[in-house]
Image (cartoon, grey):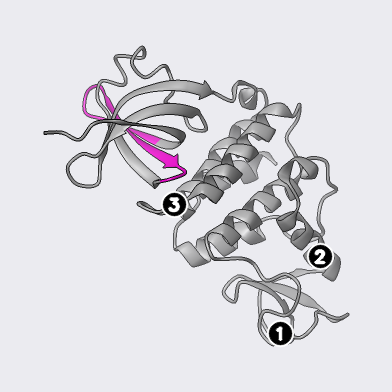
Amino acid sequence: MAAPAEERVALVLGHLDYGESDRILRLLIAEDGLVPALARGARKSTKRFGGALDVGDRARVMIRPGRGELWHLDGAELLDGRPRCRDDLGRICLLPYLCEWGLNLAREGHDESRLFGLLDVALTVLDGVSAPPSDLFRLGFEAKALTFAGLAPQLTRCVSCAAALGEEPLVYDVGLGGVAHARCGGGLPLSADDAARLERARRTPLVELIDESPLECSPWLFAEHNRWHTHRDLKSLKVLQSVV
Ligand SMILES: [Zn+2]
């Protein structure tokens, strides 16, 4: 007998059309981590799934284990469709980018409560602002996500020799995973002030990072860090870079 469906709250991180009318969803669920789920007839019956099948949506879902890795999605009810995130190009591109971070870092079959909470807050803040938030908002999200995935960027001392950053030239070394003296590592240059601001962003609630002045260094340090350590490309990165 098939296992009974269980109710969960999920974030939709991605979807893929399958067959004539089905859709495979990639869901982030706090208790279960990344859950790939088959929604039969999802492209025909919008009623059964409450329209809750777009990237970034928070939905109440009924899921049950299937054979193999794919779960079955029996129904969904939309809780938050982030409607205002589609108001400007910056946020239209940032929403799937943040969700792709969830896809890259969340594990299947693991509790991912912290990543779930972070992404849900980020999308809620994004939906509540009237213009795209600062780079530091995104970098703060990225630094927190890396930290929750066990890949915390080292920003307060040299990641190579462990000494204080001091007054000398610094770089962000993605392979070593943090800030290094230029003589100790390689990578994009950054100032001690940038390193301090990034560490502050890592520890500051996202809602307090909406209006921040730009950094001097590349704003894509953590995207590179992610790519290096997960060996996965961020497909939405190029699109986002083209609009900011
Ligand atoms: Zn050093």
Outermost residue toward the left in this view: 1
Which comes sooner in the sequence, label 2 or label 1? 1
Point out the tag, 3 or 2, that comes first from the N-terminus.
Answer: 3
Mark 2 element type: helix
70 vs 157: above or below: above
Which circle marks residue 111 in the picture?
3
Q: Position of residue 188 (x, y in %)?
A: 70, 69
The amino acid sitting under disc 3 is Asp
Which is nearer the eye, 2 or 101? 2
Q: Are marks 3 and 1 in contact (CB under 8 Å)?
A: no
Ligand 1 near label 1 (Cβ, under 8 Å)?
yes
Q: Hey, which quadrant is residue 124 in on the image?
A: top right
Between the C-alphas of marks 3 and 1, the distance is 32 Å
Tell me the residue that label 2 is attached to: 196
Q: Secondary structure at mark 1?
A: loop
**Residue found at x 33% / y 41%:** 36
- Which is nearer the eye, 212 or 48? 48
Judged left or right of residue 18, residue 57 is: right
Magenta-drawn segment: 15-31
Q: Is residue 240 above or below residue 148?
A: above
Which residue is label 1 attached to?
162
How packed is label 2: few (under 14 Cα within 10 Å), some, or many (20 or more)?
few
Residue 170: percent from left, percent from top: 77, 76
Secondary element type, mark 3:
loop
